[in-house]
Image (cartoon, helix red, strand yellow):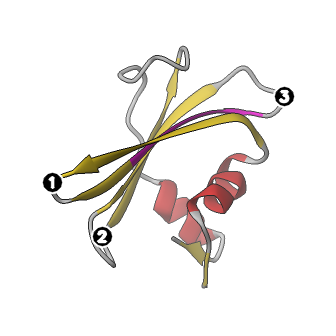
Amino acid sequence: MRKVSLKKAITLIFGEVVNLKRSKIYCNDGKEFHFFFTQKNSNIIYNLYYRDIGYTNKKVMYRQVKSYSDSVGGYNRWDFEEKLKNLGYYL
């Protein structure tokens, strides 16, 4: 297993992405990063949350959304880290 950055992990899972936009939010128990991006050659927009709450407690949630301002749409998916692990990587 090899460690990768979140940006590299996004590319490994979704392929080449465009229009990657990021904002950082500080929560009481750690940092939360909020991303919007589009897969290259696709109109599908994704919203991804990455929450770092300690050395071993990293959680990533993603979903499809309608626009870059949509922060509530789509089904929450929690299998990002599992998909990454199946490729031989971890965050």
Q: Is residue 61 left or right of residue 11?
A: left
Seen in the picture, residue 67 relative to 25 is either above or below; the reply is above
Is tag 1's residue or tag 3's residue first in the polypeptide sequence? Answer: 1
At x 48%, y 17%, the residue is: 69
Q: Residue beneath label 2, please?
A: 57
Label 1, label 3: how far apart the Cα atoms are: 38 Å
- Percent of width and height locating residue 40: 80, 34
Q: Residues within 10 Å of mark 2 (few under 14, many from 20)?
A: few
Find numbered disc 2 in the image and state the secondary structure of the residue it sits on.
loop
Q: Amino acid at mark 1?
A: Asn
Distance, label 2 to label 1, CA atoms, is 15 Å
Q: Nearer the viewer, residue 39 or 30?
A: 30
User: Which residue position holds label 1?
Assistant: 28
Q: Residue 20 at x, y = what percent?
A: 65, 37
- In the image, the segment drawn in magenta is 33-39
The residue located at (51%, 70%) in the rendering is 91
Amino acid type for the residue under numbered disc 2: Asn
Q: Which secondary structure class fits the magenta region best? A: strand
